[in-house]
Image (tube, rainbow, N blue to C red):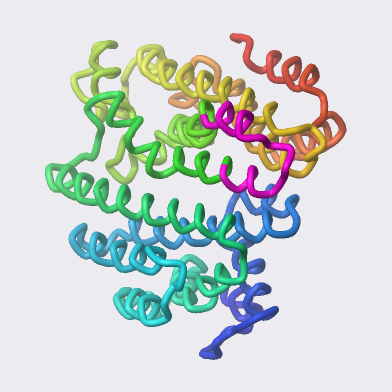
């Protein structure tokens, strides 16, 4: 990891112009597990605006995820980061105030997430180079996400003080997923429309009916896939009301030794079906993108088909609790998705058929 960070060649120098964009492209490879792939398929202003948006949201997420900062501190730091984006000027003193508020320990860290946060002064000014129709949606989504993350950081700290973080209702899950992923769908609609004259106002309005589901589909799938891993840090995003429907007093009971895996699977299957419903909307959303926009369609199709393949693999949810290894698709499956969608991206009929095969119940 040290070598990878050294290769970025940042040091204390303030990077500008091509060097700053190179830093942004290089750090993306280190901070993204999935989205680096589909961001790379884009070109021009759309590529740059989504690249920057991803980096800004990764910065906010890094603050929200820090295990050592108190929630009240996170609220302040996230507020300082949001303040940067409240005006088009993206003032340098606001960026400096945010960086100065970051934990001192981060300055000694070798982790790329911290490296990115401490180079906000490199990636934030790049947004000034983009036309306002691209920059404004990026600013708006960053401010909104910071507010939502601060809210849930406070809630999570209060819950963890009692030993376990969970959500009470499905509506709480929807709110959480909206702030960390759903608003990204809103961002994409605005950027896609800015990038082509082929998305009319009427088509954009139709896309807006489904765009929040685009982010929710991916987020709920990740919650399903990662729930056992999350439980290791005393966190569970499976709502208590679902657990009680299946005879569990508390979501933590799902992860105790000797628990009936079929009952656990029945709980998780409700979230699996919820993820599928959001994926249905997300596929409909993608088909509203004019099929001459190959790269834009592929940007959407790749993560959606990866999510669908994961859900198909998970099935009724039992395997998540019984498998010795995390249930997830292989690299070969990812390569196949990229190849097949690259050949058939233009065909709504092919998309429906390929997705429908995965959507069928096991």
- In depth, the one of 337 and 284 nearer the eye is 284
Image spot of residue 9 (x, y percent)? 63, 84
Image spot of residue 124 (x, y percent)? 50, 71
Residue in view at x 26 percent, y 61 percent: 74
**Vertical position of residue 257 compared to residue 72: above or below:** above
Image spot of residue 358 (x, y percent)? 67, 18
- In depth, the one of 228 and 96 nearer the eye is 96
Q: Quadrant of residue 354?
A: top right
Residue farthest toward the left in the current orientation of the protein = 162
Main secondary-structure element of the magenta-colored stretch: helix
Q: Quadrant of residue 306?
A: top right
- Is 198 included in the stretch rendered in magenta? yes
Residue in view at x 64 percent, y 44 percent: 192
Image quarter (top left, top right, bottom left or bottom right) of the C terminus: top right
**Vertical position of residue 235 compared to residue 121: above or below:** above
**Vertical position of residue 258 compared to residue 59: above or below:** above
Q: Is residue 280 left or right of residue 155?
A: right
The residue segment tinted magenta is: 190-208
């Amino acid at each position: 990891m040290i070598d990878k960070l050294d290769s970025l060649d940042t040091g204390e120098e303030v990077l500008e112009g091509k060097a700053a964009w190179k830093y942004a492209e290089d750090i993306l490879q280190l901070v993204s597990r999935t989205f680096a792939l589909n961001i790379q398929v884009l070109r021009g202003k759309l590529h740059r605006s989504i690249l920057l948006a991803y980096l800004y949201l990764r910065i906010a997420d890094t603050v929200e995820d820090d295990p050592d900062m108190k929630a009240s501190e996170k609220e302040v730091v996230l507020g300082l980061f949001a303040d940067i984006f409240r005006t088009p000027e993206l003032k340098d003193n606001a960026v400096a105030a945010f960086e100065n508020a970051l934990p001192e320990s981060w300055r000694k860290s070798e982790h790329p997430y911290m490296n990115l946060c401490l180079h906000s002064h490199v990636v934030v000014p790049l947004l000034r180079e983009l036309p306002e129709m691209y920059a404004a949606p990026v600013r708006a989504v960053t401010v909104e996400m910071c507010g939502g993350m601060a809210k849930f950081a406070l809630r999570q700290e209060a819950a963890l003080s009692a030993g376990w973080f969970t959500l009470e209702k499905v509506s709480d899950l929807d709110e959480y997923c909206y702030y960390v992923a759903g608003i990204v769908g809103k961002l994409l609609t605005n950027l896609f429309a800015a990038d082509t004259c082929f998305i009319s106002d009427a088509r954009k309005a139709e896309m807006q009916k489904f765009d929040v589901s685009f982010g929710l589909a991916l987020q709920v799938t990740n919650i399903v896939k990662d729930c056992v891993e999350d439980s290791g840090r005393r966190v569970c995003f499976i709502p208590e009301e679902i657990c009680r429907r299946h005879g569990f007093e508390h979501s933590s009971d799902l992860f105790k030794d000797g628990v009936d895996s079929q009952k656990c699977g029945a709980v998780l299957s409700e979230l699996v079906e919820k993820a599928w419903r959001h994926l249905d909307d997300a596929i409909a959303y993608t088909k509203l993108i004019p099929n001459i926009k190959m790269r834009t369609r592929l940007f959407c199709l790749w993560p959606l088909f990866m999510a669908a393949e994961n859900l198909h693999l998970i099935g009724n949810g039992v395997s998540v609790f019984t498998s010795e290894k995390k249930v997830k698709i292989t690299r070969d499956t990812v390569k196949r998705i990229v190849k097949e969608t690259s050949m058939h991206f233009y065909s709504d009929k092919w998309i429906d058929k390929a997705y429908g095969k995965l959507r069928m119940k096991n």
